[in-house]
Image (cartoon, coloured by chain):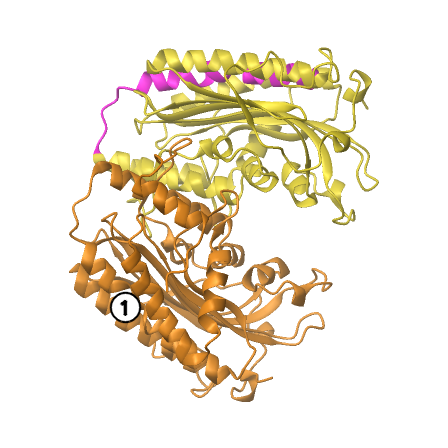
Chain colours: A yellow, B orange
Amino acid sequence: AFSSAQTSKRVSVTKVRATAIEAENYVKQAPQTLVRPGIDTEDSMRARFEKVIRNAQDSICNAISEIDGKPFHQDAWTRPGGGGGISRVLQDGNVWEKAGVNVSVVYGTMPPEAYRAATGNAERLKNTGDGGRVPFFAAGISSVMHPRNPHCPTMHFNYRYFETEEWNGIPGQWWFGGGTDITPSYVVPEDMKHFHGTYKAVCDRHDPAYYEKFRTWCDEYFLIKHRGERRGLGGIFFDDLNDRNPEDILKFSTDAVNNVVEAYCPIVKKHMNDPFTAQEKEWQQIRRGRYVEFNLVYDRGTTFGLKTGGRIESILMSMPQTASWLYDHQPKAGSPEAELLDACRNPRVWV
Amino acid sequence: AFSSAQTSKRVSVTKVRATAIEAENYVKQAPQTLVRPGIDTEDSMRARFEKVIRNAQDSICNAISEIDGKPFHQDAWTRPGGGGGISRVLQDGNVWEKAGVNVSVVYGTMPPEAYRAATGNAERLKNTGDGGRVPFFAAGISSVMHPRNPHCPTMHFNYRYFETEEWNGIPGQWWFGGGTDITPSYVVPEDMKHFHGTYKAVCDRHDPAYYEKFRTWCDEYFLIKHRGERRGLGGIFFDDLNDRNPEDILKFSTDAVNNVVEAYCPIVKKHMNDPFTAQEKEWQQIRRGRYVEFNLVYDRGTTFGLKTGGRIESILMSMPQTASWLYDHQPKAGSPEAELLDACRNPRVWV
């Protein structure tokens, strides 16, 4: 199997970094690259993946900002041993209550339980004991956008590239993960057909089996187990992807992240001026409470981030600006709210 | 050591119950007792503890309702193999946005990871393997009250009695746990002196070492690790308490739960009509976001409940009706908001 070690003069992460993740040094302008210059070279997968997500951050933020009319606020930082991040947040916008797009590059070490949270592959970690910390490299882009209008869906995407070094007898690993998924408060079948259709087309360009596989995986992943309902109406999700040439997976990931705007923005533009009632706004708030429940209890990225001591404000940027919990709220049978709940409980095939 | 088996004709829980927790059968009126009649006799610790928490539920709900002017809504249920619950919720009240007081009695079996979440005593569970499920009995009262006015604090209490049966070579255990803690949005030293003073007096009546020990434990327990700040301004917390005659711990728990009204209500009455600004309301919402973070990520009762498949609406009754997350919110230095944050980061000794 390919390893990025072949194309980068890799220095063991363990020698560079003693603690989990070092403190951030805030910088006015993000450096050209967040990977370690001269160590992880331009042609390494680490550097190339970073380029993909940096470009995507620029183009997606531009598209969102143009619709909203308000610019993103940026925070950028580096860390002494290499890596860093760029958080861009649009808060209290005209169309979005809160929209954030983060890029981060991390050289770190993680406790075994965080390794388990980072990878869906539990099998790989069986019988390894809990000794020591696992050195890793991770680069990723992640984003959540919560619009004001309850007829505009929330959208989330995340694309990431991971490498671990040899640890407790397990050789170093690399894998890709990611996905884009949508969380409306109301079911609008044509919108779902557009969103899922866009991603089906992306998938089909790379592997005819991808869409079916990643759509199903998405419905499984975003299950709020204690409620027996999904966070939203799906999309695509994949993890631990390393079953083929990494170049092919890089191409697929690039195509997927570059189609976020096309999949999402037309739906927002269509509904951003829809009239809505106080009840519809309340229902959106209740669904946001569910969003919070999923993210804090189950989401792998969030629990991984909280355990490894990453930058909290960037990790929890995914939280909605407002959310609500009502005791034993049950939508009326036959109502549009009940219809949404049904679609969250029984995932549908949209395309 | 004492075991409630001495005073109750105990039937192995494993024989009665196959699944984790059975489905609820809703009942119009809660039965006189939720323990298994004829098996767990009136003089058993199980039945006596239930009586304490049922009486407390009545008296606390009455006191809150009298202040608020609105009654509690009640849901009650039993389960085929014994046990059940009574949830009382006051939502959209005049003084409280949401106030809930739950009583539950559970005969169940839990996976080992839930056992670990249920007890703070990790040592006890070392080297036991993960095989099988642990049969247990649990009875508890739990409550969270979220007022409207940002100058009125949120308050939480929980008192519980646990028994496990023999499992994987570990003999059956019993222990008490509980505590009452307060979460204001602003620091009012006299209020904290009143609240902590009430519980110091309760503790001192039972053991001069209790208050210092349980106050410290509370500050440790309610730490939001990823933020390095506590959920609120403390109170008392204890778990795994079985170091003395259970009669004495029952007396202490009874005294503690019976002082909730005295510790909390005068503070609410004092501030319920305080004028407040939009900024103060927003700050309260941000602190409620932190409350949600603690409960969903760290709280033992919540994670235990979600894992064992208890009644979700009762478990998540603790969620505030409204909460908010703002990106990188930093209170101005010297502001009352910064003062609260400082007290959450550096626990103070109030009495």
Residue B347 percent coordinates (x, y): 44, 54
Q: Secondary structure at mark 1?
A: helix
Q: Report which quarter residue B84 is drawn in.
A: bottom left
Chain for mark 1?
B
Judge whether residue A270 is colored magenta: yes
Is residue B30 shown to the viewer in this render? no
| Front residue of B80 and A93 | A93
Q: Is residue A268 left or right of residue A50?
A: left
Comparing B253 with B314, the one in front is B253
Residue B126: in magenta span: no
Q: Is residue B232 left or right of residue A250?
A: left
Q: Which residues are magenta?
A: A248-277
Q: Amino acid at mark 1?
A: Val
Q: Which residue is mark 1?
A: B261
Figure check: B147 above or below B211: above
* Residue B349 vertical position relative to residue B46 in the rendered view, above or below: above
